[in-house]
Image: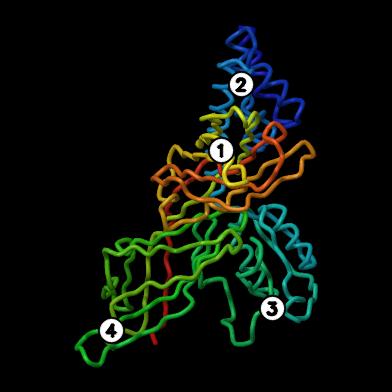
Amino acid sequence: MIHCLLLIALLAAGPTDSAADVARLVRQLDAPELAEREAAEAELLHRGPAILDLLPAADDQASAEVRQRLARLRWKLQQEAAEATARGSTITLRAEAMPLSEILAAFERQSGNAIVDYRARFGQATSDPKLRVDCDKTPFWLALDRLLDEAGLTLYPFSDRPAINVVASPDDQRATRVGRACYAGPFRVDASTISARRDLRRRDAGALTVGVEVAWEPRLHVIGLAQRMADVSAVDERGRPLPPADAAAQLEIPTTGRTPAVRFEIPLRLPSREANQIALLKGKLCAMIAGKLETFRFTNLADAKNVERRIAGVTVTLEQVRRSDKAWEVRILVRFDDAGDALASHRTWIFGNEAHLVGPDGKPIAYDAFETTRQGKNEVGVAFFFKTDRPLDQLAFVYKTPGMILTRTFDYELKDLKLP
């Protein structure tokens, strides 16, 4: 009964998320009584993903049960964080007359998305009008589109860092952003162009191409997007189907870590001349989203051989460190529990993961070159080459990678697209 009361008290206390409090609960994972250990794990899980950075790294000196409980906690919290990311942000803000700059700052705080006023960089006037805002758990993209329409602004999606960049709307741009886009979780999908091409040498030959722009909340790290043409359907204003040009195809849509937007084209069969618009275009985007970044640190490099470190849903193995042509060669294997299609050979995001040596001064030593040693569905082997004369007993190796990869599909619908 006492242990049950202890568990209830812990869960009712409410999260404080201080480092000392989390450390106390981690120590309790090794308590003599099973009920205390269970209560500590339940409370840490109750604190949510915010404590991930406060959980200690894997420690070989900890008991096997503590290591097991910490591994389970990290996996569950990583999964919870990834699922929350995929759901998209909401905005709650009400004001009759709030400066634009303050509204954007509030949007940034609530969503975790960096928002940058890019107008000065484009030589545009940087006025700060007072605007009315009325949002109650409004999806982020809808709230932002309403605000931009009110302020006569739009977005510049391409920059040197993941952020939402606000600029003045060009005079020849469509008047509003609201009503023309589809919102799907953290994604905004908008048709940007339509082009038709007819082959005059072949009867009924030609193609209709719909240009689509997909933007996502920049707090996400989107590894890649894919569009199966079998998941695309379209009809004209009379309900007549406009089938994909090749229903068996799949569009691979590459992304970068800097730009939270991409453009791609959906090829359809050319409709009859009687069609005036695409009344409805539906599709499903497959998104591969990186989980929270985790840090793997290896010491005792001279003796290291097939040393495994596991955090959440990824295992990094330091296979060996050896001297190679006046450089230290560090060979690792990165293995995900389930990478989906994120490690396909045409995807290169994982080679942008941070990897460095570090000495007693704490300064990172960058690698000079790397090569792939193996690549499979869920694993990648990499050899890093560091040109440094420092002895191994003065160095540690640090590698950072997402703790898991989430693969989800997002439905979108685009309506009333006028044909050329």
**Residue type indicated by callout 2:** Asp
Label 2 crowd bin: few (<14), some (14–19), many (20+), radius 10 Å: few
Q: Secondary structure at mark 1?
A: helix
> What residue would you read off at disc 1?
78
> What residue would you read off at disc 3?
168
Give the mark nearest the N terminus, 4 or 1.
Answer: 1
Give the mark nearest the N terminus, 2 or 1.
Answer: 2
Q: Position of residue 321 (x, y in %)?
A: 57, 36
Q: Secondary structure at mark 3?
A: strand
**Residue type indicated by callout 1:** Gln
Q: Is residue 156 above or below residue 256?
A: below
Q: Secondary structure at mark 2?
A: loop
> What residue would you read off at disc 4?
206
Q: Residue at x 28, y 82 (%)?
A: 271
Q: CA distance from mark 2 to mark 1?
A: 22 Å
Give the mark nearest the N terminus, 3 or 1.
Answer: 1
Give the mark nearest the N terminus, 2 or 4.
Answer: 2
Q: CA distance from mark 3 to mark 1?
A: 38 Å
Q: Residue at x 42, y 66 (%)?
A: 413
